[in-house]
Image (cartoon, rainbow, N blue to C red):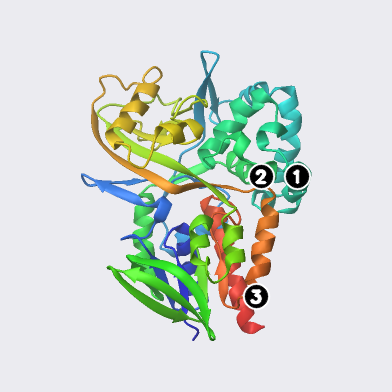
Amino acid sequence: MIRTAVIGGGISGIAAAFYLQRYGCEVDLYESADRIGGRIGSECFDGNWLDFGGKNIGRKYRRFREFVSEQGGMDFEYFGFNTSQVINGKVVRLSKEKDRLFNILRVLSLAGFGGTMRLLPLIQAVQKDHQQGYLNTPYFNAIAEQFDSKPLSSFFPTGCTEHLIRPVTVRMNGAEPEEYYPGNFGSNLALVLDSYEQLKQGMHALLDRFRENAKLINILTGKHVRAVERIGNTITLHYSSGGEDATAAYGRVIVAIPAIQAATLFGDTLPELSALLGQVRYYPVAVAIAKYEESVFPDMQRAMVFDRHSPLSNAGAYGIHDLDIVRYTFSGKTARSTIAPESVPEEVIALGEKIIEPYFTIRKNCRRFFVYKYINPGLCAYSPYHYRTLGEINDLLRLFDGLALTGDYHSGASIEACFRAAEASVERLMQQDTA
């Protein structure tokens, strides 16, 4: 049997190991942290497990739901779409729980005529064929070819950009509209057009199930892979563990970490590949989850997005029944200039509380506890003409038998997109075996 390794224990690496196990492959799964999960990981405080990312599961997440089912099945609960923002001093709400016509009219009013004319063909393309809601698909590759010489802020009118487009890109990609490109926007639309549930037991419970069911997967935590090279007929990993350097040889390797980290693995052995991976953009994000004595949100206003002058891009309820738990997200240009890796978590959360105080019940509402993470690399914003970058990466990989790449930059950053990309990477390796 061909010895196989997956580098990265985040959702992309978990998905790759899962699909390899389906093929009957024994897998070594390398993770530099002390536990798997990566950016969908959890933290425990006072007996409470809190998930930092990946909580919202779309109804159209077929691959991920199959994964959940194969771990023994878990219960989902409705989460929905319910948010608001302040425009010209007035709170404007958007909610799929309201009358559908009301919601459509509200979106049209925010987009304006010019924005609506730009948005409608894109929305129709994704609604007609959900596959267009991933990266590197025909419709949006054609959009990229025509419009990616300029950013998304030039594609939509100003009002539409600020009130509809920016809340999406800064929340999903950590990027301002001027840092994001039209050819990648289908991956955002697919998320906006879906409806959502959450796992009642949380993502941490799912990861526990995965560890229990990983019969052919050897999970190696605390092992940081520093370089990948071909030596003879094998692919050799150079890694560190407990302060010691080591190597391991494999016949197949899947690299399932963010592109910016993957680039460092090939700096000496495949500099062209390293340069291409380095073109993919990532922006840091700080996330805090705080629990309060009393409910912070009313039932029908469970989230708010903030404009580009605020370091807080979004504040929302942790779950539909967790109105006393706030998830603060700090992303975008102002957040980057305000919050750094060395920022004091207590001060960051206090800043978030000050920002939401005029709109929600936070004053004199005692905070019981919080957890906090500064994540860098954080959210993926891809690259202009991203489909070209992916094509060049794939061309180089054809020269390196037994090696595949996957991650949030291949099909998109959603959990389902990561599973889709991982499945494709495994299939490519399996096809090499039979060629």
**Count of numbered labels shown in the rendering:** 3
**Kind of residue at disc 2:** Gly
Find numbered disc 2 in the image and state the secondary structure of the residue it sits on: helix
| Rendered image quadrant of residue 361 | top left
Instruction: Mark yes or no: residue 334 visible.
Output: yes
Image coords of residue 253 (percent x, y): 51, 73
Q: Kindly identify which residue carries mark 2.
A: 186
Disc 2 from disc 3: Cα separation: 30 Å
**Label 3: how many Cα within 10 Å (few below 14, some 14–19, many 20+):** few
Q: Residue at x 31, y 28 (%)?
A: 350
Q: CA distance from mark 1 to mark 3?
A: 30 Å
| SS at mark 1 in the image | helix
Q: Residue at x 60, y 57 (%)?
A: 410
Q: First in sequence: mark 1 or mark 2? A: 1
Q: Amino acid at mark 1?
A: Ile
Label of residue 399 in the image: 3
Q: Report the Cα–Cα distance between label 1 and label 2.
A: 10 Å
Q: Would you say the residues marked 1 and 2 are in contact, meaning their CB atoms lie under 8 Å apart? A: yes
Q: Is residue 38 above or below residue 13?
A: above
**Residue at (33% x, 37% y) in the render:** 343
Closer to us: 320 or 93: 93
Left/right placement of residue 102 relative to residue 296 reads right
Label 1–label 3 contact, CB within 8 A: no
Q: Residue tagged by mark 1? A: 143
Front of the two marks 1 and 2: 1
Near mark 1 (Cα within 10 A), the count class, few <14, some 14-19 or many ≥20, is some
Question: Nearer the observer, disc 2 or disc 3?
Answer: 3
